[in-house]
Image: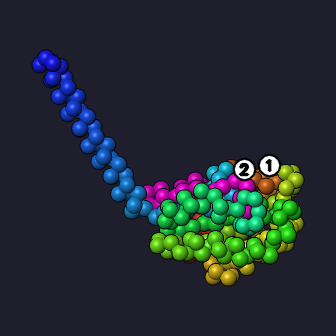
Amino acid sequence: MNKTKLRLLAVALVILLVSSGLAAYFILTRNEKTSNLIRVACVGDSLTQSTAYPYDLWLLLGTSRYTLENFGAGSTTVLLSSQTPYMNTTVFQNALQFEPNIVIIMLGTNDAQPSIERYNASFVGDYVRLVDAFQALKSKPKIWIVLPPPIFSNQSGKIDPEYFKLTIIPDIEQAANETNLPTINVFSALANYSNDFPDGEHPNSAASQLIANVIYKAMISQNT
């Protein structure tokens, strides 16, 4: 190998080492900054996964102080007897591994399916089990239980609005009482916003902002 090729190889090696060092520096710096932020986990179904509410909430809380992750999993339920329990998802495991300092749980809408009403006796116990999993984390997170927004119509044919209102909402409140956790009443706050739920179940961007605002105000009022 001639001297010119050796010089080129040496230069390339120096560039590689410098680049690797810079990359490592930026990764370490980013991780250090992230570790100093308050970690917020938004747990839920498609009302969390497929809406802008978690991002809107993050903006309200402050991106320089909080890091927020969306741990929504569409079509999931609190009930472990359904075909799609939230606790059986990898998203749930990811939420635990995130070791959040704050957990916002907004689940229960899909538990209003007529096909699984027969399992309702287990709803409160299953909800408590979900909460227990987060309370067992080393990070000892603050947890808020959100009463989900109303179901304004049953266009999908899968959800029973009245059953949701008369059974699921009270059951969520009971689970909150049994775990001694505060609730955030999005259900009542959005009762007059049916026009912002195009399919009767899922919020548009305006309703997502409203959900974020309600949750933010509740958190701030309790000095989060």
Q: Residues within 10 Å of mark 1 (few under 14, many from 20)?
A: few
Q: Quadrant of residue 84?
A: bottom right
Residue drawn at the location 85% of the way across and 55% of the way down: 158
Q: Secondary structure at mark 1?
A: loop
Picture coordinates of residue 48, whole percent (x, y): 66, 56
* Residue 176 picture location, percent across and down: 68, 77
Q: CA distance from mark 1 to mark 2?
A: 7 Å
**Badge 2, how many Cα within 10 Å: few under 14, some, many 20+?**
some
**Corner quadrant of residue 11:** top left
Q: Quadrant of residue 95?
A: bottom right
Q: Is 144 above or below relative to 177?
A: above
Residue at x 69%, y 58% (from the top left corner): 45
**Region of the chain picked out in magenta, as a range:** 55-77
In the image, residue 91 sits, relative to residue 20, either above or below, namely: below
- Looking at the picture, how far across and down is residue 178, in whole percent? 67, 82
Instruction: Name the residue furthest left.
Output: 3
Residue 88 seen from this side: yes
Q: Nearer the viewer, residue 5 or 71?
A: 5
Which residue was labeled with disc 2?
A: 204
Residue 128 lies in the magenta-colored region: no
Q: Is residue 57 magenta?
A: yes
Label at residue 130: none
Residue denoted by label 1: 198
Q: Nearer the viewer, residue 132 or 187?
A: 132
